[in-house]
Image (spheres, rainbow, N blue to C red):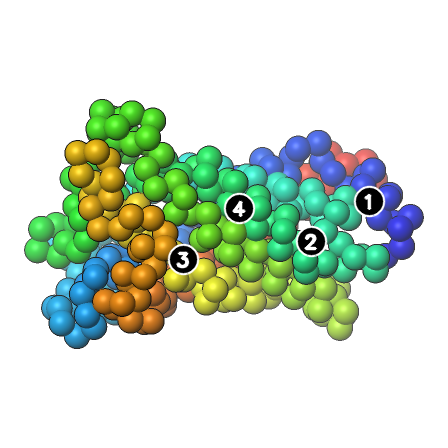
Amino acid sequence: MTEMTIAEKSANGSYGGMEFAMGALSAVGAGFFTNPMDVIKIRLQLQGELEARGSYARIYKNTVHAAYIIAKNEGILALQAGLVPALAFQVVLNGLRLGVYNTAKNTGLILDEKGNTSIVKTILVTGTTGAFAGIIGSPLYLVKTQLQAQAAENIAVGYQHRHSGMCSAFATLWRENGIAGIFRGWYAGIPRLFVGAATQLTTFGLATDWLKSINAFPDRPLLLTFLAASIGGTCIAVTMQPFDVLATRLYNQGVNEKGKGALYDGLWDGLVKIFRTEGFFGLYKGVFPMWARIAPHTVLCLVFYEKLDQLYKNVFVPK
């Protein structure tokens, strides 16, 4: 792609902010389908917290067994625990993340002189946007995590906050420590979402470029997006998992009367304690449901976005 083409794309490729709305709507659609895997992932990540491998009874043996145990003891709807704050968080996260990514792509900001994905630029733009969105949406992620961790007493793992719902959770957090309580552990999502967003969207962009270079599915853009998103979703499960475990632990831990974490005193302290007591694989607890959630979520989110983009162009963009 020449500089002229990029300039033309800059003038005509942006939709006046609609990228942000389409990103939020796409993520909400994907979240309905993938939230059950998020619940399972949270439970597996909290199981055996700060206990040596093999020294504790495993309530949840694997992903399928966890789904069965949760449904049996708490009802099938328990697999959609924390759905409302989870979807609200997706609006904040992917409204910003996909909005900025697609705006930057359409205007050539994250492309090289040939019009292909610039790895460094894409990592910096998407990673920074993901981390920023994570800070803004941190209260929603905090409540989502605590609600998903809540379980029937006989299958409970990790600290149990015993909220009766999203509003109750926010009221309790505010009552305990005001704004600091609402934003408790806000820093936990920064490495998680910087690495996650950068990996997901950079590999998606590179995979898209490669598929186009071999002329794959020239008349089927949704299938091309599906394959590229599958690659991006798989890569993110590997790179983000340790930071995802760390974020789950930091957000779900109990606090003392001063609002300080009862188990972990920040990111580095949490990372060291998990590694020392649970080993390397402690940081990869729940990796299969993580992949089973994030890969389909990536695919659905980006495919939904592609479809909304097509509809918008057909209806509102002059031919």
Residue 93 shows in this picture: no
Q: Earlier in the sequence, mark 3 or mark 4?
A: 4
Q: Are marks 2 and 3 in contact (CB under 8 Å)?
A: no
Amino acid at circle 3? Phe
Which numbered disc, 1 or 3, marks the residue closer to the eye? Answer: 3
Residue type, label 1: Lys
Three-letter residue code for mark 4:
Gly
Q: Say which element carries label 2.
A: helix
Q: Is residue 224 left or right of residue 274?
A: right
The disc, 1 or 4, on the residue closer to the chain's N-terminal end is 1
State the image coordinates of residue 163 (x, y, percent, origin top left).
Answer: 19, 36
Under mark 2, the amino acid is: Lys
Q: Is residue 146 visible?
A: yes
The front one of 295 and 282 is 282
Query: What residue is shown at x 83% (from left), y 38% (from top)?
Result: 11
Image quarter hosting the C terminus: top right
Q: Disc 1 marks which residue? A: 9
Classify mark 3: helix, strand or loop.
helix
Q: Would residue 203 appear left or right of 91 to someone viewing this image?
A: right
- On the image, numbered disc 3 is attached to which residue? 243
